[in-house]
Image (tube, rainbow, N blue to C red):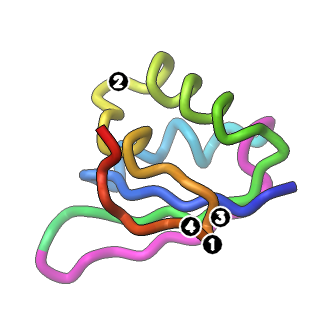
Amino acid sequence: MENFKLRAEFLEDVIPLITNTKIVKGFSLERDEEFPDVVLTFTSEWSLDDLRKMIQYSIEDSHVMYQTLDYEVNYTGERNG
């Protein structure tokens, strides 16, 4: 299993991901004091590419999530286009 990290515009954006126990095995959330953004750190058996595809095509308005998703050790929070 690997640890991943991503940023989302709103808490509601990550709910479909964190409630899917087939994908996410454990998680933690950080909230921003000034903005509605949240940072999700989670563990999964899925590959980075498979997670990106699933987020992009299965979760509505998820562009910030899949553009910031990376392995936790490489995470910057910057959108990668």
Answer with left or right where residue 1 lies relative to residue 16. right
Q: In x, y percent, where is residue 26?
A: 74, 62
Determine whether the residue tagged by mark 2 lies in a helix, strand or loop.
loop
Give the alpha-carbon distance from disc 4 to disc 2, as whole Å.
25 Å
Give the alpha-carbon distance from disc 3 to disc 2, as whole Å.
21 Å
Q: Which residues are magenta?
A: 22-34
Q: For the residues carrying marks 3 and 1, which lies nearer the camera in this image?
A: 1
Determine whether the residue tagged by mark 1 lies in a helix, strand or loop.
helix
CB under 8 Å between callouts 3 and 1? Answer: no
1 to 60, vertically: above or below: below
Name of the residue lying farthest toward the bottom: 33
Q: What residue would you read off at disc 4?
A: 74
Name of the residue lying farthest toward the top: 57
Q: What residue would you read off at disc 2?
A: 60
Give the alpha-carbon distance from disc 1 to disc 2, as whole Å.
27 Å
Give the residue type at disc 2. Glu
In the rendered structure, find residue 10 and report the number of the disc placed on it.
none
Answer with left or right where residue 73 lies relative to residue 57. right
79 to 61, vertically: above or below: below
Q: In x, y percent, where is residue 54?
A: 58, 25
Report crowding for label 4: few under 14, some 14 to 19, many 20 or more residues within 10 A (C-alpha).
few
Give the alpha-carbon distance from disc 3 to disc 1, as whole Å.
15 Å
Q: Is 28 part of what is drawn in magenta? A: yes
Q: For the residues carrying marks 4 and 3, which lies nearer the camera in this image?
A: 4
